[in-house]
Image: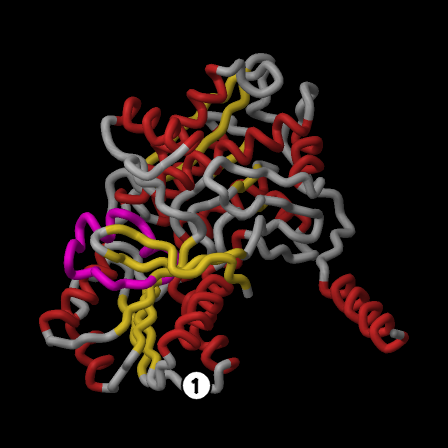
Amino acid sequence: MKDKALAAACWLACVAAAAPTFAQEVKVTDQGILPNEIVLGTHQDLSGPIKTWGVPVSNGMKLAVEEINAQGGINGRKLRLVIEDSAYDPKKAVLATQKLVEKDKVFAVVGGMGSAPVIASQDILFDAGVFQLFPLTAAEFTYKMDPKKPQERLKFSNLLPYVESTRAALKYMVNFKHPQKPCLMYQDDEYGKNVYEGFTSQLEAEHLKPASITTYKRGASDFSAQVAKMKSDGCDLVVLGTILRETIGAMTEAKKLGWTVTFLGATPTNIPDTISLGKDTVEGLYAAGAFETPYADTAKGKVKDWVEAYKKMFGTDANTQSVIGYNSIMTFAHFAKLAGKDLTGQKMLAAFESGDPFNDIFNSPPSKFSKTNHLANTITQVQQVQNGRWVVIKEGLSF
């Protein structure tokens, strides 16, 4: 018992030593908090290579804003959402963020789209004391804080981290499929590098060596060389640090070569568009994910009501991306309500860091933050495309 107590004490001491401590107070703006409204902003890809993400994410946000405002707003204040198109371009994201901060006077930027656009523009927010909330990237920079930079307390993430989710999914697939020559193809940017880190770290833990690692530039459309190399190297499990077109492109090339291999996608591949565009080509694809895809004919209760409301408002079916957009606004609303009627930036920060959990209607893991942890959760699922639908294979995975 004494040994266990000593070990527990040592563990707690190590955790305390590793946690960031901020000597300086963080500067938080009160701009965007008006007597009758709260102004929020976002930059999305509405016209570029991942508009299949940006459009439904924006729609999900709009639905949440409408729902909240129809119920009287948050402690008497309505929400106003300003949406800018970044086209998944870091330079355009910088310009959009400057507009949101300087002209629109937003209180927070919620759900900014993409690793490269977000990292290019985030210092504009921190310098102005504006919150960066729940960006549409699970890269580690969205939640890891440098104690020497107190303004980094303004960033919070509620997406599965690419490193941890890749590790959890890969660990499951190694135990399930027993690959001997795992391989990786990834996008050469912040997103892809996080998938690379998760892939290589987990292989090391499994005492496996990669048979092949290959990259491509963001926006590429030809993956014949990468796929041919992985086939030649004898890969028996291919991890894809890809998004939509690249996932379908890689699997299409494999099919052309008559190469039957198991594919495991990182979380951005786990969307209905992968199936609707890839059709039979992506049948059998595995992917890391966060929650079950809401299909109209199987949804129940509040989720069914939400699916129907989305269809009525936008004339199209809800999907994984629209869930993420909706949840980003609903998560903000939960903590803004907790902050009270006399809302300020400092009170909002205190509410976020209170440890009070937000539970969504989709049975996702609770979103909970503290002063030292600005990542909501690390719970992962593995799903597979079966008969044209995403099906949960294993849930409750974590790393």
* 21 relative to 385 in the view: left or right: right
Q: Residue at x 23, y 27 (%)?
A: 315
In percent of the image, x 33 and y 78: which residue is there? 183
Query: Residue shown at 53%/42% (left/top)?
Result: 132
- 213 shown above or below 276: below
Look at the image and tell me in which quarter the N terminus lies.
bottom right
Report the side of 149 relative to 122 (left or right): right
Quarter of the image that includes the C terminus: bottom right
Q: Is residue 123 at all visible to an observer of this figure?
A: yes
Amino acid carrying mark 1 in the image: Leu
* Position of residue 88 measured from the top left corner of the image (x, y, whole percent): 32, 47
Helix, strand or loop at label 1? It is loop
Magenta: main secondary structure equals helix
Q: In terms of image quadrants, where is residue 262?
A: bottom left
Locate residue 60, reporting x and y percent: 38, 33
Residue 122: within the magenta?
Answer: no
User: For the magenta stretch, what is the residue range?
Assistant: 266-286
Can residue 55 be seen by looking at this rendering?
no
The quadrant in which residue 73 appears is: top right
Q: Position of residue 189 (x, y in %)?
A: 37, 62
Check disc 1 and report the residue beneath it.
Answer: 208
